[in-house]
């Protein structure tokens, strides 16, 4: 499936190739000028940045429109097997620069900007981030659709059009505060609403929103409308333009006429509001699956709309239900869309009128499931009662699946009641619940984890009994990220440096980065790398100063830990490292220490109190260090608020060090680790998730791995005592004592008591103290290396050279061959 080399095509030819004929991008009668004038009726002389952004975006959309249509027509004509990627989250970020890059329109944009004396960078800032996701899982979905389009796969992404994305984070007094992210306040130039393709979703209840909380009204069946909003997904080179279809909920009739004529005007309109609140907001909690009725319905709504849509498309070109699984692959991004199992069964049984066995066979062959976490508290389980009230037919189907499943288990493992209990789709005891992971595994032909170690643990521990039952279904697909956004676009200077050395074939064949290996021994290239890094650091420092007033020294080591705030990700361990370094300087003010800047960024789930306290602690640590003249200029800590795709695009290229220090066995894969690696940062980290495979690819000698392995973590649970480390490791003890002495909370005595509780009293479940000493040793090795820039550059280059495996193109190629049996369908 190798794609062609990236031919350099001239802009005019490009426009022709995109079907634009004689249309000009800019000029007297160009797209850009026309949009400025006609869309917003703006005087070309008095135009503002937002209008310029919109005009650019609309012009780019015009250029891709015909190719977008042609892509869809090609799929209709060729009738290939299509991939349907179902995800509750797509963390897209901004689209303009990405689409310009993938369409190779940079020269046109530059030309237009020059003609109109427009500054492109501030104009790009006008686009809000599409933050329709929480973190890694949502960003992965965004990288995947980029790769599927680039590899010319006939694919569609299905998700929800939340009016509010992930909340905006601000800091007040060091505490996280949340604000709603009304990202659609202004019209979004990338979406195309398709009211004609709306679908109906039937529920066995109605629902109300009362004082902001969801209430199901049983015994009053209702129908919702799913309105599709399509967004173009531009493959690199602009050959394929796929679709991301996001569903928005609406009331079926704008209001109920009967109620209206009987005088209940307000009540009828209230129903409309309730319907529309279904897709109002993204749930911002990625750590606990607390039963929330609205979330349950959101998940069903995504599934019902998407399956209705794909079945309609299937029926357009096919007559026989028996070929469904030859034409349709459906990937479930975690269990969030796992209701696809009973929904597809319902369609095949009740609408297509197939028998159970045939329906079951087609369902399993069409569906595949990806697991993204082993944390028990994040595994979804929905009260059986909710199915009863809202989706009784689905419950009936699930229970019948379960009956057949357990009959089979009992006959294969007679007398093994415990096994039956663990496999059952129903969790008994107390409130009965449906285990969505079990449902997804049983109702599909493939279950994959997202890194080798994660897939192994999934099989051997989390769902062991199911893996024993269906060993052939389990497989691994190590995550990847798109090198277009994360290297070419985010780090143009480094990208150019690489291209000058090895050509531009790496952009859609990232394994070609291995050609850089010999360049590690090339002094000129090492210097070019160091210049590119310094350039990215300077740019970041300038942006930081301009937007926040914070000043950082580009001569310091930029060390970044950016991800959701979670105990298992151990931001606290990073903070403890800083406290130890700080103590060393306090004890010995003349100590020579390479200047360091520690960047933290990430959001805490609004209800996750300890995570929010960790943010507060990092901020207090930052403040205390800033106020201490002994360490000033040598240590700096910064918590950057509002971590999002756009901030990642700025910070990752500027980082020297990537901090990946989860408790081994808990981070399924990680994906920022890969972005840092391809941008030439060195990783300090634990043997967890994909970091293990990254070290393998770069050579362990080019990595700073430390700490307990997953086996040691699991094996040590019984005997581990954080007190031992406190008693026996002087630096550990001094760091903790300093925190507990309120050194970092002088005006807020006692606020960090919960940190003592978690790190000592309650047993330090995530084993921070067990790894602190090894962490500091690895840190020392890293600092020593930084003092030798040539050696540092050598290792960084070997990291870039080894990062080819972590392109999402490779991941998608594996999904396409091993799971979907899908082939490219090139657009002529
Ligand atoms: C869970 C829940 C629970 C219910 C409420 C809403 C919600 C939203 C998201 C999640 C998913 C958490 C799982 C997740 O994001 N896993 C991450 O997936 C990345 C991509 O595979 C992977 O790199 C990270 O290691 C993993 O933590």
Image: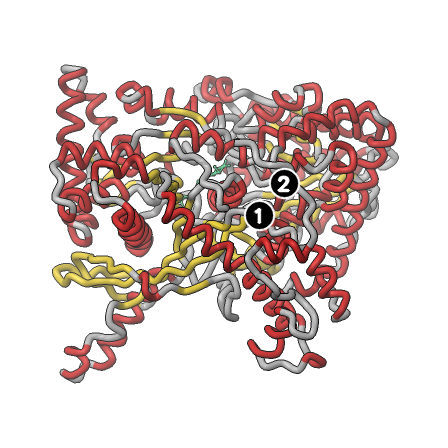
What residue sits 84% from the left and 30% below the top?
Answer: 789
What residue sits 13% from the left and 24% below the top?
Answer: 407
> Would residue 27 appear left or right of 454 to someone viewing this image?
right
> Would residue 450 appear left or right of 278 to someone viewing this image?
right
Q: Residue under circle 2?
A: 561
> Would residue 774 appear left or right of 299 to someone viewing this image?
right
Q: Quadrant of ligand 1?
A: top left
Measured along the vertical axis of the image, is residue 10 above or below residue 45?
above
Circle 1 crowding by C-alpha within 10 Å: few under 14, some 14–19, many from 20: many
Circle 2 crowding by C-alpha within 10 Å: few under 14, some 14–19, many from 20: many
Residue 607 appears in the picture as rendered: no
Q: Which mark is residue 565?
A: none
Measured along the vertical axis of the image, is residue 478 above or below residue 184?
above
Measured along the vertical axis of the image, is residue 682 above or below residue 339?
above
Of residues 656 and 564, which is closer to you in this image? Answer: 656
Q: Say whether marks 2 and 1 touch (CB < 8 Å).
A: yes
Q: Where is residue 219 in the image (x, y as percent from the top left)?
A: 12, 60
User: Which structural element holds mark 2?
Assistant: strand
Residue 230 appears in the picture as rendered: yes
What residue sits 38% from the left and 39% below the top?
Answer: 334
Q: Which of marks 2 and 1 is nearer the N terminus?
A: 2
User: Which structural element holds mark 1?
Assistant: loop
Question: Image quarter for residue 655?
Answer: top right
What residue sits 57% from the left and 78% below the top?
Answer: 38
Of residues 320 and 665, which is closer to you in this image? Answer: 320
> Would residue 559 appear left or right of 788 to someone viewing this image?
left
Q: Position of residue 582 (x, y in %)?
A: 74, 38
Classify mark 2 as within 8 Å of ligand 1 or not, answering yes or no.
no
Q: Where is residue 104 in the image (x, y as percent from the top left)?
A: 65, 51
Q: Residue under circle 1?
A: 602
């Amino acid at each position: 499936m190798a794609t062609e080399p990236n031919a350099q095509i001239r802009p005019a030819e490009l426009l022709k190739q995109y079907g634009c004929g004689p249309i000009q991008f800019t000029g007297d009668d160009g797209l850009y000028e026309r949009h400025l004038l006609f869309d917003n009726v703006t005087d070309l002389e008095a135009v503002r940045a937002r209008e310029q952004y919109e005009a650019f975006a609309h012009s780019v959309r015009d250029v891709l429109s015909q190719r977008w249509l042609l892509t869809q027509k090609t799929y209709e004509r060729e009738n290939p097997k299509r991939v349907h990627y179902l995800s509750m989250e797509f963390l897209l970020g901004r689209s303009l620069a990405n689409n310009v890059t993938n369409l190779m329109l940079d020269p046109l944009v530059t030309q237009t900007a020059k003609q109109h004396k427009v500054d492109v960078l501030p104009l790009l800032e006008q686009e809000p981030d599409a933050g329709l996701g929480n973190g890694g899982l949502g960003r992965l979905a965004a990288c995947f659709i980029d790769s599927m389009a680039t590899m010319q796969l006939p694919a569609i992404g299905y998700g929800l059009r939340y009016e509010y994305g992930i909340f905006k984070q601000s800091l007040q007094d060091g505490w996280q505060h949340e604000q709603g992210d009304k990202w659609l306040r202004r019209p979004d130039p990338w979406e195309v609403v398709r009211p004609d393709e709306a679908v109906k979703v039937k529920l066995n209840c109605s629902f109300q929103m009362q004082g902001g909380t969801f209430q199901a009204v049983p015994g009053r069946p209702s129908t919702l409308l799913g309105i599709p909003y399509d967004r173009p997904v531009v493959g690199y080179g602009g050959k394929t333009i796929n679709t991301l279809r996001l569903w928005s909920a609406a009331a079926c009739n704008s209001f109920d006429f009967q109620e209206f004529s009987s005088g209940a005007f307000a009540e009828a309109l209230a129903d409309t509001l309730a319907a529309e609140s279904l897709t109002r907001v993204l749930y911002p909690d990625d750590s606990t699956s607390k039963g929330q009725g609205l979330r349950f319905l959101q998940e069903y709504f995504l599934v019902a709309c998407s399956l209705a849509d794909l079945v309609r498309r299937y029926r357009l070109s096919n007559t026989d239900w028996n070929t469904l699984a030859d034409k349709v692959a459906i990937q479930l991004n975690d269990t969030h869309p796992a209701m696809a199992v009973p929904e597809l069964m319902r369609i095949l049984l009740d609408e297509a009128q197939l028998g159970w066995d045939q329906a079951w066979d087609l369902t399993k062959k069409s569906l595949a499931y990806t697991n993204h976490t082993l944390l028990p508290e994040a595994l979804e389980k929905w009260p059986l009662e909710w199915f009863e009230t809202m989706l009784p037919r689905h419950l009936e189907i699930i229970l019948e699946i379960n009956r057949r499943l357990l009959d089979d288990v009992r006959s294969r493992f007679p007398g093994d009641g415990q096994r039956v209990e663990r496999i059952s789709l129903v969790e008994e005891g107390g409130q009965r619940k449906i285990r969505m992971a079990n449902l997804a595994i049983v109702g599909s032909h493939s279950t994959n984890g997202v890194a080798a170690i994660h897939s192994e643990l999934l099989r051997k521990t989390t769902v062991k009994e199911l893996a024993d039952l269906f060993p052939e279904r389990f497989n691994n697909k190590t995550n990847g990220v798109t090198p277009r956004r994360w290297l070419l676009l985010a780090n143009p200077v480094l990208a150019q440096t690489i291209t000058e050395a090895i050509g531009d074939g790496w952009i859609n064949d990232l394994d070609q980065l291995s050609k850089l290996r010999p360049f590690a021994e090339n002094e000129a290239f090492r210097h070019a790398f160091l210049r590119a890094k310094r350039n990215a650091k300077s740019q970041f420092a300038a942006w930081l100063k301009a937007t926040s007033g914070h000043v950082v020294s580009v001569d310091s080591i930029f060390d970044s830990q950016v991800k959701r705030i979670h105990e298992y990700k151990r931001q606290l361990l990073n903070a403890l490292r800083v406290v130890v370094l700080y103590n060393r300087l306090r004890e010995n003010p003349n100590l020579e220490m390479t200047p360091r800047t520690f960047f933290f960024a990430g959001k805490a789930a609004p209800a996750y109190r300890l995570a929010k306290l960790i943010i507060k602690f990092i901020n207090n640590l930052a403040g205390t260090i800033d106020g201490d003249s002994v360490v000033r200029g040598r240590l700096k800590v910064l918590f950057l608020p509002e971590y999002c795709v756009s901030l990642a695009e700025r910070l990752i290229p500027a980082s020297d060090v990537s901090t990946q220090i989860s408790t081994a066995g808990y981070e399924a894969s990680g994906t920022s680790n890969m972005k840092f690696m391809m941008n030439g940062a060195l990783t300090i980290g634990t043997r967890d998730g994909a970091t293990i495979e990254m070290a393998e690819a770069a050579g362990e000698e080019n990595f700073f791995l430390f700490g307990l392995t997953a086996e040691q973590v699991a094996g040590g649970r019984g005997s581990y005592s954080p007190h031992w480390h406190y008693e026996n490791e002087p630096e550990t003890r001094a760091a903790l004592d300093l925190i507990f002495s309120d050194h970092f909370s002088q005006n807020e005595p006692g606020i960090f008591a919960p940190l003592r509780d978690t790190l000592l009293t309650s047993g330090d479940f995530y084993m921070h103290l067990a790894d602190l000493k090894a962490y500091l040793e690895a840190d020392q090795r890293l600092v020593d290396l930084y003092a030798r820039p040539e050696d540092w550059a050598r290792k960084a280059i070997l990291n870039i050279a080894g990062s080819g495996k972590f392109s999402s193109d490779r991941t998608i190629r594996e999904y396409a061959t091993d799971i979907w049996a899908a082939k490219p369908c090139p657009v002529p």
